[in-house]
Amino acid sequence: MRVASLFIALIFVVNVPVAAAEPTVWNFNIWGGKRAFTAGIETIKKVLEAEAPGLFELRINYGDALGPPKKNPESVRANAFEAAQFCVGYYPNKFPLLSVLELPFLLPNNLRQRANIEMEVLAHPLIVEEMSRRWNIKFFGPAFLPGYEFMGNKRIETVQDLKGVKIRISGLNAKALELFGAVPTMVTAPEGYTALDRGTIDSFGQPWTYGHGAYKLYEVSKYATEGFNMSGFMCFQGVNIEAWDAAPENVKRALPVAQTKAIEAMIRAYEEADKYWIPIFHEHVEIVKIAPSERAKLQEVSGKIWKQWAEDQTEKGRAGHEILNFVKTTVYKYTN
């Protein structure tokens, strides 16, 4: 009798279903739709999910679906959602040391060089600390951008043409343009179309060419520049530290490979965007070629802006000179 009871009990145990492990889900917030800029996070999603089928999901929420981009640091810190896109220029004083990568003409125009430099700077201990201590954020993925050009309804061919122009450009680059009389006006990328259409701004600085094309600025513009190649936003993808700590170990191990593949995917996407958008731009706007001599006039003032940035950071107790020197050394490493 006891043997029969034991046999029945064993049958019952064997047939009890084992509960499946709950998958780890990260919600990622990003503005705008799918475009060249999002090729990086889309590649990271593909690589990481393949490493943990059914156990890890990275949900990309386009179009600010989870909240406005200017609130991404606070939202990720509070774990309202696990991860997001960040562009330093949207958050004055929130990532002060990382803003070094927005200094005008500091980074090269070559996309692969730019990506490699940004990756090294994002790994610097002082930058890691800036993200983690204040914002509870870990760097997660690259989001580098091509150089900035201007599209809008004011014809810009020389630096003198900048005088009085209400122009969308981020903080540190804005300082260079202000020296020539431009009036920097901060609006987000999704707001650009309406701002140009209503005349709130005269010209919009965006990564060439994908940025202007993705937001269809050519529909409400008459002119575009080609040849300024200014530095623009410093962007990156970040994740809440507790969310990262709870991720599957194989997902963590796969991240460096995913980041490398993301860089390659973004470079390809930007190159493809140029081939697609330039013919369309020619149909809608006059593309104004900027002479190297005009660009050089902006470059001449940049050294003073770099020095002032470092001094301002130092006055506030931050390692401004150390970070600037590190970036300059890293730029030299990849460009010589």
Image: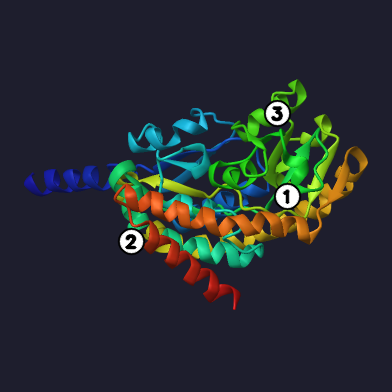
Q: Position of residue 50 (x, y in %)?
A: 50, 56
Task: Name the residue nearer the viewer: 70 or 104.
Answer: 104
Q: CA distance from mark 2 to mark 1?
A: 31 Å
Tell me if 94 is positioned left or right of 199 in this view.
left
Closest to the observer, 166 or 251: 166
Asked which secondary structure carries label 1, the reply is loop
- Residue at x 36% of width, y 48% of height: 131
Disc nearer the start of the sequence (3/2): 2
Check whether the beta carbons of the residues at disc 3 and disc 1 lie within 8 A of each other.
Answer: no
* Residue matched to label 3: 201
Q: What is the number of the mark on residue 208?
A: 1
- Residue 47 lies left or right of residue 276; in this view the side is left
Q: Looking at the picture, how far across and down is residue 174, in whole percent? A: 59, 42
* Residue type highlighted by circle 2: Pro
Tell us which disc is closer to us: 3 or 1: 3
3 or 1: tag closer to the N-terminus: 3
Q: Position of residue 206 (x, y in %)?
A: 68, 43
